[in-house]
Image (spheres, rainbow, N blue to C red):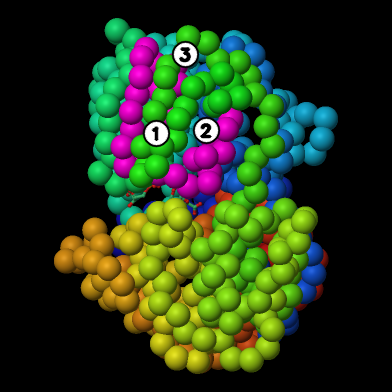
Amino acid sequence: MNDARQHDDANERGSAQNHGAAVGLTADKITIRGGIPLVGRIEVKGAKNLVTKAMVAALLGETPSVLKDVPNISDVRIVRGLLEVHGVKVTEGAEPGDLILDPVDVESAHFAAIDAHAGSSRIPILFCGPLLHRLGEAFIPDLGGCRIGDRPIDFHLEVLRKFGAVVEKQPNGIRMSAPNGLKGAKLELPYPSVGATEQVLLTAVRADGITELKGAAIEPEIMDLINILQKMGAIITVDTDRVIRIEGVDRLMGYNHRALFDRNEAASWAAAALATDGDIFVGGARQPEMITFLNVFRKVGGAFDICDDGIRFYHPGGDLKPVIIETDVHPGFMTDWQQPLVIALTKAHGTSIVHETVYEQRFGFVDALVEMGATIQIHKECLGGHPCRFGQRNFNHSAVITGPTKLHGADIVVPDLRGGFSHLIAALSAEGTSTVSNVGIISRGYENFIGKLRLLGADFDLEG
Ligand code: EPZ
């Protein structure tokens, strides 16, 4: 193993532990004795992929904002740190999970301070619009985030330039300014990127004039961000066919908002219930944002009950059935759902296909599953559905899963957030004992997952 790889591994271990430590998880490794069905009730809070953007939106207000149902996850800690180095006061509110974000004293931050906080997140890129409006300048360090593809920011830089921002690439990041202010623009995204759509929303709401965005992302998290911006005083119209119109306004005020629930966490626990022959009630989960997931869950052979305060997910018995899944932008099957659900597909009677069309390298988690006894082959072709952007481009983006196979215990290392949760499920459903390392990464998006595993009757020890 070459020095660079050892260096990367050491870095990853370091950042995994930092993620864990940020939310009180000191352990780096978990030893799981598998084969026990997970049974019980857990609660999910606000969505990581909305809460982190809602915190950035508070920068646009002239008065404090209150965000409710904020999960204690390390991605929230990272954004909080970035807001504080820019002079935002962040305090806990009256209720657990309430955050008060006071942007009155926003100020420029030294790039080193920003860099220290940015490390492993993609969120800093979304600070651009609000900081350009508030300060006339912004600095973005090199971005992090899960290694599930190249993850360029070309769409972000393109739209910011169209608003009138001056973008200067520098050795340690990107510096931006808006000498003539920011003006509304006619924009079209080549792909409905969630991040680039959020970039346009957070910039256009206070830009001079009207912005029309074609090819926009319409994920539930985008809609909830639009709810928040409208509460602040913005004028935003969502048309059919992915067109969003924003009329810039001069002033925005703080919001008071309860965050949309985390449908990615809910889907992950549902996948855990199915793969462990379990029965989990996910408090806070709602049907409208999970319709596509629920359809596939039922097709595989899972069962669910929709209740006022959540959704019960369980294995009703009988053999699981193979399916063909093609990930896509909303309302398609979400890319963040495929990794956790693959474990149940290893137990299905027949051949399943997962065609990953959102990220070009999201099967890094599969090697460990094959080591545990799964039969999974990765292909460069677009299998099981429609040709996608990655076809003919040499990316391993389709998986063929042949079941049923019995997983057995092994020593595995968490590669990224959703891959990490998938590895937990694999160890929980396997015969024998597994050790899962780098578990701190899972703290980036799953609040108190250790406590929830205890609640659901899992048998494990923490180490490190
Ligand atoms: C958000 O990432 C989520 N992250 C991701 O969840 C989620 O998988 C993704 O949206 C898709 O739903 C957060 O919200 C923090 P994109 P984002 O811009 O905004 C390409 C998780 O596990 N692209 O919609 O980064 C890009 O490379 C994470 O919670 C460009 O080419 O996703 C990708 O192939 C993982 N140029 C595709 O678009 C750009 O400038 C979708 O990316 C921007 C994106």
Q: What is the spatial separation of the Cα atoms under label 1 and label 2, in whole angstroms?
A: 10 Å
- At 45% from the left edge and 21% from the top edge, which residue is drawn? 205
Q: Secondary structure at mark 1?
A: strand
Q: Are marks 2 and 3 in contact (CB under 8 Å)?
A: no
Amino acid type of the residue tagged 3 in the rendering:
Val
- Quarter occupied by residue 351: bottom left
Residue under numbered circle 2: 226
Looking at this rendering, what residue extends furthest in the front direction?
Answer: 240
Task: Specify the quadrant that holds the C terminus.
Answer: bottom right
Residues 317 and 403: in front is 317
Q: Position of residue 72 (x, y in %)?
A: 69, 44
Is 242 on the left-hand or right-hand side of 319? Answer: left
Q: Position of residue 382 (x, y in %)?
A: 26, 71
Q: Position of residue 291 (x, y in %)?
A: 56, 61
Q: Say above or below: 431 vs 245.
A: below
Amino acid type of the residue tagged 2 in the rendering:
Ile
Q: Secondary structure at mark 3?
A: loop
Q: Which residues are magenta?
A: 201-228
Q: Residues within 10 Å of mark 1 (few under 14, many from 20)?
A: many
On residue 135, the disc is none
